[in-house]
Amino acid sequence: MGCPLSTTRALWADTAGPALPLPPLSGDTTVDVAVVGGGFTGLWTAHYLAEADPSLRIVVLEAETVGFGASGRNGGWCSALFPASLDKLAALSDRSAALAQDAAMRASVTEVARASDELGIDAHVAVGGTIVLARTVAQVARARAEVEHARGWGITDDRLRWLDEGEARTVLDAEGTLGATYTPDCAALHPLRLARGLADSLVRRGVAVHEHSRVTELLPGRAVTPHGTVRAGTVVRATEGYTARLPGHRRVVAPLYSLVIATEPLSPETWERIGLRRRETFSDHRHLIIYGQRTADDRLVFGGRGAPYHFGSRVSPGFDGDPSVFARLRATLVELFPVLTEAKVTHAWGGPLGVPRDWCASVGLDPATRIGWAGGYVGDGVSTTNLAGRTLRDLVLGRDTDLTRLPWVGHRSRLWEPEPLRWLGINAGLRAMTWADTEERLTRRPSRVARAIAPLVGG
């Protein structure tokens, strides 16, 4: 397989088509709602508010360009995954509330597809579900335990099921496959086409969307930029992996980097050998996360964790690429699919995602300050942002709904530890997950390292 390119430009940026230029803020203004962040959280929030009350004056402020962050650089999964488990959600509330959150996540996958279609956004959506391979004896045990645990929550076979080796290989014929789990609750899509389409729709509705308008200070009733101050009855923080750049928010979420590669378009013969005929998304049951999808133009997009956390929660364009991580991704991809040994990698990129200390995403609105927030998606944000947008709509408008009663609403994760403890702990956790996968391959038993480190990495 050809080496990844030295550039860190995402495939999505090269295949999204021309973008509608959006002007920076020019001077002070007063609105009803100021949304800080032009990614999915901010765009969906503005969309649902404008739809619910067209009289609202809404402004969206984006530091770079629409979809610049994780929204335009992810792996293109729109899944029902929520970063906190049902058990953790039940501990925050109760069993019925946890199941309501799960149902809301599944409904969000459907809603993203529905809204995209209604708005005329061609985001290359394909609802093929997700297959998660089990390729070691320890992974088989973990996969079967996951299915059994789901049954205890009343989750039936039509929502999560075990596939034996033969069934799994008919969906995705990866090397070493012993079985898999499958859920229908996921869509593959082109994330930047979706983000830009949402922004275009907002502009047509009369919502002001300003690019290159970095907010340097977020206060009750004000969002301050170098180009002017926006005064608003409600201010919504939708900054995810870039939250640490805001004064007073350094330890709210940790920006962890996820890196991605994409191949050239593959031949029909190659895809016949690999599978993914319905554009299912895929992963496996290892500890260090990997993820992939088949794009609408028949490329294979493949990403994973493993890039280091940078001291002081720093984010920088220079961190978007890591040659050693790209090389590991390429090697893992060939290990999974030897047929790709000679395939060219045309794009290699990355970016930060937001991780709260307890790995539980949250959304809320402080009634005293009228500052709203959403985030900490831990990489599961393409659908969760949509749920956040609809929830923030109801909170801003003062509605008491099923969405505003979900257990993630109003949740406050504790702050991350100060440095250097944050740097030491996060990077030790990332390294431990790699060790755990190696341990399981060698011992053929579930990793003791993974059990020990699980409380530090959201387990």
Image (cartoon, rainbow, N blue to C red):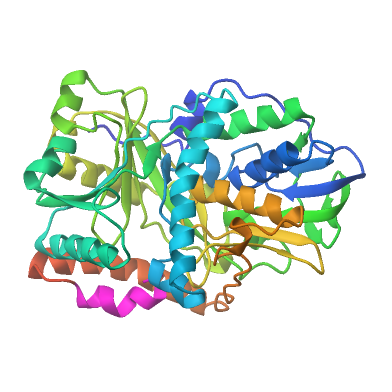
Quadrant housing residue 121: top right
Q: Residue at x 20, y 66 (%)?
A: 145
Specify whether residue 303 is painted magenta: no
The relative height of residue 9 versus residue 107 in the rendered view (above or below) is above
- Magenta range is 447-459
Res. 350 visible in picture: no
Q: Is residue 77 above or below residue 402?
A: above
Which one is nearer the viewer's eye here, 124 or 24? 124
Residue found at x 43% / y 58%:
102
- Image quadrant in which the N terminus is located: top left
Judging depth in this view, the residue of 459 and 105 nearest the camera is 105
Q: Is residue 272 something that shows in the picture?
A: yes
In the rendering, at what x and y percent does residue 24 appear? 79, 36
- Asked if residue 457 lies in the magenta stretch, the reply is yes
* Residue found 56% across the figure and 63% down from its top: 406
Q: Is residue 284 left or right of residue 390?
A: left
**Residue located at (18% from left, 50% from top):** 180
- By secondary structure, the bulk of the magenta-drawn segment is best described as helix
* Percent of width and height locating residue 287: 27, 62
**Is residue 265 left or right of 140 when viewed as pictured?**
right
Image x and y of residue 254, in percent: 54, 65
